[in-house]
Amino acid sequence: MSAVERASGSAADAAQPLQQALESLRLEGAIYFRAEMTESWCYRTLPPELTALLRPGAKSLMVFHIIAKGRCWVSVGDGEKHWAEEGDVLVLPYGDQHVVGGEHEAEGDPVPVDTLLDPPPWDEMPVMQYGGGGERCDIVCGYLYADDPLFDRDMAAFPPLFVVTPEGVAKAFVQASIDWALETRNSYDAEQEASTRLPELLLIEVLKLHLANAPATDRGWVAALRDPVLGPALAMLHAEPAERWTVADLASRCMVSRSLLDQRFRKVLGRPPIRYLTEWRMHLADDLLATTDLTIFEIARKVGYESEEAFSRAFKRATGVPPSARRGTAPVASAPVKRG
């Protein structure tokens, strides 16, 4: 049976790798402020500054807005307005700069968000209040950090901005997040389990809903998992990262030609097969360094390197730091909070 025949199953079969990828995610984050806006209003975010504030050292953060009351829109750059109703969740998986506004057009330019919030550290959950005194829109805003290929912008697993109307479990998490934000204004502690676990659970469910209903695309990681050639190839690379893979070996096991395999990797994922394998190995190694007591040599062997020296060189090229610098450095993703 060819790779094309093996990958021509149901949509449920195609979605299984996505489900597994989402369930294995390690997300870190917090609900970090509430917005109480009144018509007419419009503000813009400052992603680099916000990222540096909330998660020093991160390239970007996933940002989400839960609409607790009213209706609003969000746009990225000069793009279209994405409208969201009460109970909806707006997600910006790459943390792009964006503009948020209400139903009525506000006068003048969007107000920078840093002028509407007191500077940190915060000893209570910040509440941003702004607008012309008309109809109110309440938003619960949060962020998440994930050092995972699923959120590599080049992989294009997600659009820059999308809206989800939660159902089932996700709907319950939305209401729990809103209730928590409303109840903890005067006793905010970003290290409380609820402040980190709620966003993690909510976003995983929201991402599942989005991926289950997203239109088919011809590029990106999601498209690759559903691709009749790339789907089987990625499954093999993910299952056996320590294997001494060559393009010829991978093509042979997928029962396609080397040229076709290379062409599909470059077209859909924007990189050749061995570069993808190297990036996947570095992701796995980074996770093992941060979360296990394995020696660097043991980790090197687990991700396909016979010597610690070769692994260390590859890791430094990929991340900019040696493996020892990542040892036990799982990100601390909590909003700055004033202590005592």
Image (tube, rainbow, N blue to C red):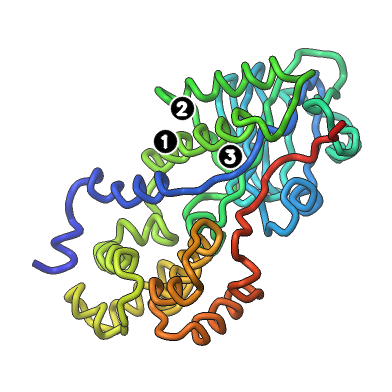
Gap between marks 2 and 3 measured at Cα: 14 Å
Neighbour class for label 2 at 10 Å: few (<14), some, many (≥20)? many
Do residues under tags 1 and 2 come within 8 Å of each other at their CB atoms? yes
Q: Is residue 260 above or below residue 23?
A: below
Do residues under tags 3 and 1 come within 8 Å of each other at their CB atoms? no
Image x and y of residue 279, in percent: 48, 71
Identify the image quadrant of the C terminus.
top right
Image x and y of residue 237, in percent: 32, 69
Which marked residue is nearer to the observer: mark 2 or mark 3? 2
Residue drawn at x 35%, y 48% as measured from the top left: 20
Neighbour class for label 3 at 10 Å: few (<14), some, many (≥20)? many
Gap between marks 1 and 2 measured at Cα: 8 Å
Point out the residue furthest to the left here. 1
Gap between marks 3 and 1 measured at Cα: 12 Å
Image x and y of residue 248, in percent: 26, 85
Residue drawn at x 64%, y 53% as measured from the top left: 331
Query: Which of the two discs, 3 and 1, labels the residue nearer the N terminus?
Result: 3
Q: Identify the element where label 2 is drawn.
A: helix
Q: Which residue is mark 1?
A: 209
Q: Is residue 144 above or below residue 322?
A: above
Residue 212 sits in quarter: top left
Q: Which mark is residue 223?
A: none
Q: Is residue 232 above or below residue 203?
A: below
Query: Which of the two discs, 2 and 3, labels the residue nearer the N terminus?
Result: 3
Q: Identify the element where label 3 is drawn.
A: strand
Q: Amino acid at mark 3?
A: Val
Q: Which residue is mark 3?
A: 91
Q: Which residue is mark 2?
A: 170
